[in-house]
Image (spheres, grey):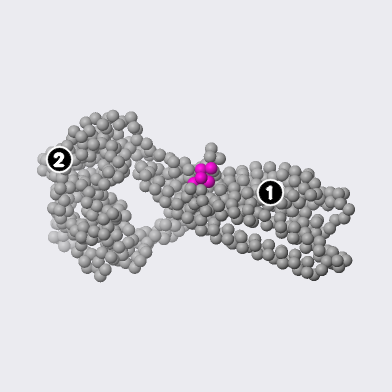
Amino acid sequence: MKNNRLLWGIKYIWIHNKQLLITSVLFSVLLGIEPYFTLLVTKELLNEISNFIGNGTTSYSIIILLLCAQILLQIYTSYMNYLQEYYEKKNLALLEHCLKLGLFEKTSTIPLLVYDDPEFHNQFSRINSNIATRFWTPIKNIVSMFRTIISLTSYFLILLSIHWILVLICLAATVPLCIIFTRLEKGKYQFNYTNTLLNREIGFLSFILTDRQNIKELRIFSLNNYFKLLWSRKFKEHAQKTLQLEMKQNKIKVALEGINSIFYVICSLLILFLMKNTRSSILIGDFVVINQALMSTQSSLRQLSYSYSQIRGNILYLDEFYSFMNDHFLKIDQSLDELYEKGKGDLSDEHIAFRDVSFKYPSGTKDALHGISFSVNKGEKIAILGENGSGKSTLLKCLVGLYMEYSGEIRIQGISSRKYEENQLRNKFSVVFQDFIKYPYSIKENITYGNIEDADNNEKMIESSKKAGFHNIVSRLADGYDTPLSNFLNPGVDISGGQWQKLAISRALFKDSEIMVFDEPTSSLDPTSEIGIYNQLFSHTEDKTIIFVSHRIAAARFADKIIMMKEGKVAEQGSHDELITLKGEYYKLFDMQSRWLVSKNDFGKVGV
């Protein structure tokens, strides 16, 4: 399985950025052969210097020539290393671009319900951290091993000139190194895996302390010191765990270095013994170069072991990335297709129909929605009311296709919503969520993001803005619709929460879908502005079906039908007058809000 993941990684890079592989292999060859020539030049130089000092048989010109060759080899190595570094950075940037695009594409298809799972965020945090470097590292290590093997070949040739036993001893010493280094790398991966949540919390606390939107509340509630201490404690906890791991692994590495040094001394003595017994004379250059070849062999074999362990360790990351990119996450039970097919197209009078819809969050102990049934005719304005946690927002997410993991059936124009292609279903809805995005770009961009393909339609943009009551605000700005919002990227203006909501409604209107869904779109507006928005909105959208969530009875009175929810169920439904007559949950809410308004007015008359 691991080898398959590695082959998949190599294939992925070859398809998307083959230049990275080609240049890495090329530089490995060019740099791998250099040590052999360096050793040969060094040997000749030392021998010539020895002869020159001993009997003067060597001329200056030969020594100078060898010194020049040595300098040229050093320049060659430095230049090749710089080139390799440049091309690797260049190609890694291209690889990161490709991987990020793939990741963004994947996250755009993951069911929204998955985002409610903390383990998903842990996994995503691991694979998204240094994505290109970690993806490339195991493959880079293979290329590095290739370079090391080329260099090792030259060292082996030199050692074989003395005795084959030297090569055998070096190879035998490599096996335990591979095993130990592999275990160390696996330990690092397990450490990162188990501390993902702690890392995420440290990052979140850093965001809390530095983000502009948070600073106001931190200062008002005097929370700066609390969160700084909390961040400091978590940071130190992680640092201590990291240092403990480093200390444990460094002790093992120091022990290996000690064994390696003893091994070097023994082999050096063995070389001296073999050379003395196999040659009539020993030249200083020969001994130094052979000894250097031994050291380089040890170093290369250690590097080979380390690269192998890196591959085994980093391939765990590659495996997790592969699993994430190929995971289908939550799947809809296809056996229900026959149920959805029944009655297809026989509800022409009903624009939207809920039939016994229930939904439960994976971490929930009870249904967030239970047995929801109601219908909406084309062009109707529907208000959904209920206490916090009654399931209003969950119901809307099921309706627009963000949550598809429900039981029962939701039909749009007589067809099960699960029968639509994803884009078909999305295009039927314009939605304003409670937590809509506030883009730090121009007003025009913020509105036209509702339908990016029609972004140049200024007339439509202005018309949408007028319907939402936002145009008068824009007309007072010097740069009008080109005004940047917030100062996050460029100097711009900060608008109020209510003005942002009007902009978000403008964005939804710009999309111009047949069904409009609003999740408390006017919660930041005063009652007068709210009534004005609904009056204007409904008068310009007579042909559109509108479903909106609100806590205010005043807004609900604009609706053709009111859905009153309680504890995930439809408690009652009907028009305002019908529900008042019923004297149920809606009547209680109406009575409570009416009493509050009367009390508020009386309070104002007293003048306190």
Q: Is residue 106 magenta?
A: no
Q: Are marks 2 and 1 in contact (CB under 8 Å)?
A: no
Return the x and y of residue 360 as percentages of the image width and height. Answer: 33, 37
Return the x and y of residue 574 as percentages of the image width and height. Answer: 14, 40
Mark 2, other Cα within 10 Å: few <14 / some 14–19 / many ≥20:
some
Q: Which amino acid type corresponds to the residue marked 2 in the rendered image?
A: Gly
| Residue numbers of the magenta segment | 7-12
Return the x and y of residue 283 as percentages of the image width and height. Answer: 84, 58
Q: Which residue appears at 78% of the width and 63% of the height?
A: 45
* Inter-mark Cα distance, 2 to 1: 80 Å
According to the picture, the residue beneath numbered tag 2 turns out to be 574
Return the x and y of residue 253 as percentages of the image width and height. Answer: 66, 50
Q: Which amino acid type corresponds to the residue marked 1 in the rendered image?
A: Leu
Q: Which mark is residue 329?
A: none
Please tell me in which quadrant of the rendered image residue 31 appears.
bottom right
Name the residue nearer the viewer: 42 or 585. 42
Q: Where 420 falls versus 38 (above or below)? A: above
Question: What secondary structure is found at the residue carrying circle 2?
Answer: strand
